[in-house]
Image: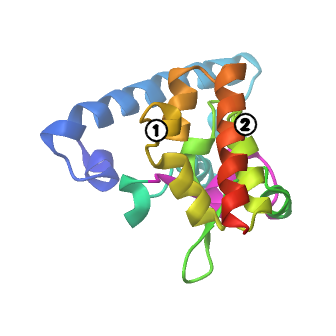
Amino acid sequence: MGPITDQVAPITEKNALTIGELLDRVERQLKDRGDELAQQGRSLRSLGELDDLAGRMVAALPNVHPWDTTIGPFYDTAGLMQWLGVSRQALADRERRGTLLACRTSDGHLLYPVLQFGRNGQVRPGVVDAVGILKRAGADGWAIATWLTTPSAAFEDDSAVDYLVVHRSSKDAVDRVKAVAAADAATWSR
């Protein structure tokens, strides 16, 4: 490995191959993008300062947090804004409306569990429904995230998120998650 990988993560037998593979893929995609830009008479430098460009690329990677083992990993606000290409206000509006799950840390920062997002940045079907239902019942982000990730007999001993993944967010799976969320929300607001 080299100086880049030495700064990314401690190199262990378990993650060395993954880091190398990721860097190889990033390099290939950057070369492809560079070739596209060259055909247009431009270069990667035309996209902005290289440090800014690298920062935007790294911002798409989730942050590490102590809750990662059960709920995370997480995006922070700046990283999620860059990945989704939206403003801080847009994120706040989505969180307020219950269409985006955010967990507030004790020092006031918001963290967004990666588990809620599909590849294209949309909140997964079923998850978005449960977030809205549980938020309207008064649950905070941590309670909702815990609900989404805790195995339950209601989901064949899977968590709600795993149940949705296993069943490919089918209509029946989404309907089950919504029904269980509504039933639990009703007991929480008593």
Q: Is residue 1 left or right of residue 180?
A: left
Of residues 144 and 153, the one drawn nearer to the viewer in this rendering: 153
Residue 75 within the magenta-colored segment of the rendering: yes
Residue identifier under label 2: 122
Q: Is residue 52 left or right of residue 129?
A: left
Label number found at residue 75? none
**Residue at the image position 77 percent from the left and 46 percent from the top:** 85
Q: Amino acid at mark 1?
A: Ala
**Residue at the image position 62 percent from the left and 80 percent from the top:** 108
Dot 2 crowding, Cα within 10 Å, few <14, some 14–19, many 20+: few
**Residue at the image position 82 percent from the left and 55 percent from the top:** 94
- Measured in 3D between alpha carbons, the distance from the residue under mark 2 to the one under mark 1, in whole angstroms, is 27 Å
Label 2 or label 1, whichever lies nearer to me, is 1
Residue 176 within the magenta-colored segment of the rendering: no
Q: With respect to residue 145, does 160 lie above or below?
A: above
Q: With respect to residue 164, does 146 lie above or below?
A: below
Residue 16 locus on image (x, y percent): 22, 37
Tag 2 near tag 1, CB within 8 Å: no
Of the 4 image quadrants, the one containing the C terminus is bottom right
Residue 63 locus on image (x, y percent): 48, 57
Residue 98 shows in this picture: yes
Residue identifier under label 1: 153
Task: Tell me the magenta residue range.
Answer: 71-88
Q: Is residue 76 left or right of residue 12?
A: right
Q: Amino acid at mark 2?
A: Gln
Residue 17 locus on image (x, y percent): 23, 31
Secondary-structure class at tag 1: helix
Secondary-structure class at tag 2: loop
Residue 5 locus on image (x, y percent): 29, 46
Give the mark nearer the N terminus: 2 vs 1.
2
Of the 4 image quadrants, the one containing the N terminus is top left
